[in-house]
Image (cartoon, grey):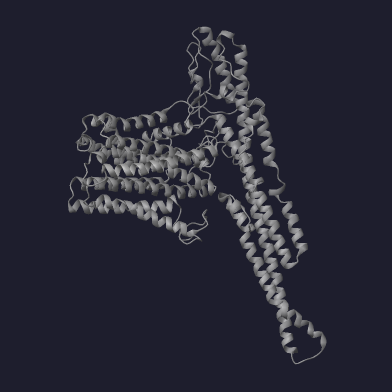
């Protein structure tokens, strides 16, 4: 593999400006080589004939000699240009490394300072436990346990004031402890929310949240570990294919090339000596900082266990990856087999023909369609995870996921295949019972059992079936439902965007709830959940909800992030989508030509708004000044044609609303199939959108309306806020 390709494959995309412009330097060497080849071979041999006397060709030789001398001077000028250029590249790399180093060192000093604060608080609490009578002692914690010290510190958090007791002596004993903790924190300049000290009274019963500290919504230990992780990650990139070693290798190779072409060995040796003495090679500030932080954290917060303090961020393959792949493949094969059986049974039952009764597609089919759409979305998320990993997009950092518990693409494929196998298996069993004329009670029980199993697994409190992922999903959904009460994080608004593509799924969920709760199954009448006024009104509300939640998130971010107008512009996009949905709703209620025109205008305007935001804001494309025609300067995928194709596909799939307005006169069965197909296409569009959205986030995530790269530390400076 050529080194230029190797460099392109290994460089960290968001640090592209900190690497040697290897291609440009190679181009200069190529120009020097072409110039030398054009002036040396034939002309230089002819010029030696000048030593053998006068001839008729002397005037030509004189002109050739003059031309050669001019070419040689031009070659020397090009060599000079090359070394000036490579010197600027060295200066650029050194400046970049220095800036990065300064940032990490400042951050490291703050970490050390806060570790000292926590160490002092820990010592105060430790001394208070030893001085307190045994009957009032709190439950013992493991030596050096950080969790025991920090379990009460969160956002908003409290300094633990001891365990409350029923005696007055116990209450009085806790007050000095609280005072000592307050004093320890205030000695280190820690600020408080409200007048915490005034709340502590000698005769009052101490509360668990006596002292409120301004701490971000994260565990303090996790903040330190996150910083430690980012520090070691940076060192790893520097040492193993990162900015430092790759740049050194690039300088070495490019100097070898220019030496081979020009024979400028002295200048090359002088430059390489300068490279090896440059700051990005000889500086060890970050390494010394690493040792200092590791030593302090290991000694006082990790029980001298270096395995806890030292985090290795080398890509680790899941030990069970082969097992997961095996089961994913097994479930996929089972799904294909069951789907074939389902197709045969459906043909014999005649459920997907216009002449058949519509009971199945109007009742059971929407319930199973809900599960199928969920499985499709999980599968596409697995595809996203695979592509993000393949192109080295740090999605775990962007979403603030723990790498140890975050889903891998194999996990997503396993969940999707197992889920879909269970769904198709239930559909096959349902049709089998229907084909053999079993009672309706047996038929109606299968979708309900499947739903109960899925809900049970989702909220299962035991540490099985990806509990961390399930609980994270539930937290994100809670944050979305109660917008704008919760701070909007990247995972929250990203998931809210997914919900805007899952409106048909939400409608299926509404029908399923009605199907099981309102008694639709018992009476066997699907009209109960289709024709009632309350059901239709709720369906319209569901059509608005995802856009409404997303608009509230934009408003909250507008207020929290310095009144950035981009958030209000983004909010306008979702408002236009709600207007378009209302126009389609009015046309569906009374299909008059005027309402049709209004629906077309509203939907067209919303689509143009959404396409602009997709391409320009979310994907960062359509930049007329980009060196890549109407794309962006930095691209991760090598083939530009993929971006143009994706843009065209996004336009086509965004126009799916045309079918919902210009509904073709089809039977109930065909309508259900068309609706399911359009819902699937929208999920496919969203999965396709997800990759480019995170690619742009990965490359440009320090913009004004992007997630912040800095991980918050436990104790923040109130004055700086």
Identify the residue at horizontal 77%, vertical 91% (top origin).
Answer: 55
Left or right of 196 on screen, residue 597: left
Quadrant in the rendering for residue 404:
top right
Quadrant in the rendering for residue 514:
top left
Question: Which quarter of the rendered picture does the N terminus lie within?
Answer: bottom right
In this view, which residue lies farthest toward the right? 52
* In front of the other: 508 or 296: 508
- In x, y percent, where is residue 583? 24, 48
- In x, y percent, where is residue 675? 29, 46
Residue 21 visible to the viewer: no
* In front of the other: 339 or 42: 339
For residue 702, above or below residue 208: below
Left or right of 348 on screen, residue 171: right
- In x, y percent, where is residue 600? 26, 53
Q: How many marks?
A: 0
- In x, y percent, where is residue 284? 70, 42
* In front of the other: 62 or 352: 352
């Amino acid at each position: 593999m050529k080194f230029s390709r190797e460099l392109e494959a290994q460089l960290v995309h968001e640090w592209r400006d900190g690497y040697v412009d290897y291609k440009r330097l190679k181009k200069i060497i190529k120009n020097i080589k072409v110039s030398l080849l054009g002036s040396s071979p034939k002309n230089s041999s002819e010029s030696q004939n000048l030593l053998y006397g006068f001839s008729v060709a002397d005037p030509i030789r004189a002109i050739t000699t003059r031309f050669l001398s001019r070419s040689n001077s031009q070659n020397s000028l090009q060599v000079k240009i090359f070394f000036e250029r490579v010197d600027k590249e060295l200066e650029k790399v050194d400046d970049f490394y220095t800036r990065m180093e300064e940032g990490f060192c400042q951050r490291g000093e703050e970490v050390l300072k806060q570790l000292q604060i926590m160490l002092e608080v820990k010592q105060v609490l430790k001394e208070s436990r030893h001085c307190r009578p045994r009957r009032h002692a709190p439950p013992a914690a493991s030596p050096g346990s950080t969790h025991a010290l920090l379990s009460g510190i969160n956002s908003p958090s409290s300094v633990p004031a001891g365990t409350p007791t029923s005696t007055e002596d116990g209450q009085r004993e806790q007050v000095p402890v609280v005072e000592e903790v307050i004093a320890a924190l205030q000695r280190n300049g820690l600020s408080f929310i409200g007048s915490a000290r005034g709340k502590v009274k000698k005769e009052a019963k101490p509360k668990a949240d006596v002292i409120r500290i301004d701490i971000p919504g994260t565990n303090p230990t996790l903040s330190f570990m996150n910083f430690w992780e980012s520090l070691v990650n940076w060192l790893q990139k520097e040492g193993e294919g990162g900015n430092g070693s790759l740049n050194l290798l690039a300088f070495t190779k490019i100097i070898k090339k220019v030496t081979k072409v020009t024979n400028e060995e002295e200048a090359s040796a002088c430059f390489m000596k300068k490279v090896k003495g440059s700051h990005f090679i000889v500086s060890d500030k970050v390494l010394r900082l690493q040792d200092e932080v590791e030593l302090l954290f290991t000694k006082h917060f990790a029980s001298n266990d270096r395995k806890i303090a030292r985090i290795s961020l080398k890509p680790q393959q899941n030990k069970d990856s082969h097992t997961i792949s095996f089961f994913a493949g097994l479930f996929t094969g089972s799904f294909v087999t069951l789907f074939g059986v389902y197709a045969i049974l459906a043909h014999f039952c005649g459920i997907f023909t216009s002449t058949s009764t519509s009971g199945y597609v109007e009742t059971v089919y929407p319930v199973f369609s809900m599960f199928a759409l969920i499985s499709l979305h999980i599968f596409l998320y697995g595809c996203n995870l695979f592509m993000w990993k393949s192109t080295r997009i740090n999605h775990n950092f962007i979403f603030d996921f723990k790498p140890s518990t975050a889903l891998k693409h194999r996990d997503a494929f396993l969940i999707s295949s197992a889920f879909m196998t269970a769904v198709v298996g239930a559909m096959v069993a349902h049709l089998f019972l229907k084909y053999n004329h079993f009672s309706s009670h047996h038929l109606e029980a299968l979708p309900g059992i499947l739903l109960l199993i899925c809900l049970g697994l989702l909220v299962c409190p035991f540490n099985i079936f990806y509990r961390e992922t399930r609980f994270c999903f539930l937290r994100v959904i809670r944050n979305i439902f109660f917008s704008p009460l919760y701070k909007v994080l990247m995972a929250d608004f990203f998931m809210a965007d997914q919900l805007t593509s899952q409106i048909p799924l939400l409608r299926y969920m509404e029908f399923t709830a009605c199907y099981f709760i309102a008694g639709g199954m018992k009476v066997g009448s699907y009209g109960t959940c289709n024709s009632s006024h309350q059901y239709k009104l709720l369906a319209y509300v569901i059509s608005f909800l995802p856009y409404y939640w997303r608009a509230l998130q934009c408003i909250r971010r507008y207020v929290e992030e310095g009144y950035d107008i981009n958030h209000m512009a983004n909010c306008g996009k979702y408002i236009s989508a709600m207007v378009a949905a209302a126009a389609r709703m009015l046309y569906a209620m009374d299909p008059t030509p005027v309402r049709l025109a209004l629906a077309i205008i509203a939907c067209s305007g919303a689509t143009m708004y959404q396409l602009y935001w997709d391409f320009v804001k979310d994907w960062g494309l359509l930049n007329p000044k980009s060196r890549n025609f109407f794309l962006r300067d930095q691209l991760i995928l090598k083939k530009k044609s993929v971006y143009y194709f994706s843009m065209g596909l996004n336009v086509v799939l965004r126009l799916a609303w045309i079918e919902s307005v210009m509904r073709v006169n089809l039977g109930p069965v065909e309508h259900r199939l068309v609706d399911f197909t359009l819902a699937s296409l929208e999920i496919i569009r969203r999965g396709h959108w997800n990759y480019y959205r995170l690619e742009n986030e990965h490359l440009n995530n320090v913009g004004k309306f992007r997630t912040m790269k800095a991980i918050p530390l436990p104790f923040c400076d109130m004055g700086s806020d």
